[in-house]
Amino acid sequence: MADDVIGYDQLMQDALRSVVRASLQEAASPRGLPGKHHFYITFRTHAPGVIIPEQLRARYPEEMTIVLEHQFWDLEVYADRFRVILKFSGQPQPITIPLKAITRFFDPSVKFGLQFEQPHADEARMVSGDESIPAAREQAPVSESAPAQSDSGVVSLDAFRKK
């Protein structure tokens, strides 16, 4: 197998994360989430750049899922992360989540979801600055009828096309 010097895995990862970012930007707009859209966002609590209260980090040592539906405030979306205020135990708390820390994104109102593979232990490495663990490879999107995936890793999007 030839070496992928273009970095298609990273390009795909970035493209899929841009879907998450654009969805969050829609929610952050003055009109807020349109229709019945709402998001379940699962993220790695110890990923570089994640800012959450320490009691949440202790309670959820691996992953945590938040819901952006009715009660969230001051959602700010940046190129590489988002910040939002949510209530935990009745207290409003700001949290910051880098897009690379997200492992799953799901909008149940339209049954749309993305799942991101975790980097393997031998691939994971910490780097200094704002960079985080190397980006994971994309898995097949989550849906009621999962798209076909060939042995080569190519995902068929036919399941998502309107018929």
Image (cartoon, helix red, strand yellow):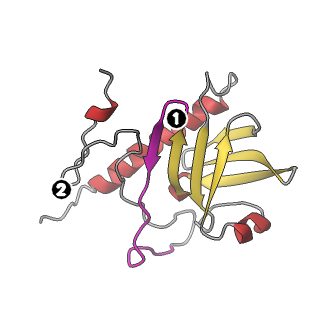
In this rendering, the answer to whether 17 lies above or below 4 is: above
Q: Is residue 31 left or right of residue 144?
A: right
Q: Quadrant of residue 33?
A: top right
Point out the stretch of residues depicted in magenta: 108-126
In percent of the image, x 52 and y 35: which residue is there? 22
Q: Residues within 10 Å of mark 1 (few under 14, many from 20)?
A: few
Q: Which mark is residue 151?
A: 2
The kind of residue tagged 2 is Asp
The residue to which callout 1 is attached is: 22
Q: Is residue 153 left or right of residue 133?
A: left
Classify mark 2: helix, strand or loop.
loop
In percent of the image, x 35 and y 55: which residue is there? 10
Q: Position of residue 41 (x, y in %)?
A: 58, 48
Classify mark 1: helix, strand or loop.
helix
3D distance between C-alphas at marks 1 and 2: 30 Å
Which of the two discs, 1 and 2, labels the residue nearer the N terminus? 1
User: In the image, is residue 48 part of the stretch drawn in magenta?
Assistant: no
User: In the image, is residue 117 part of the stretch drawn in magenta?
Assistant: yes
In percent of the image, x 63 and y 64: which residue is there? 45
Instruction: Identify the image quadrant of the N terminus.
Output: bottom left
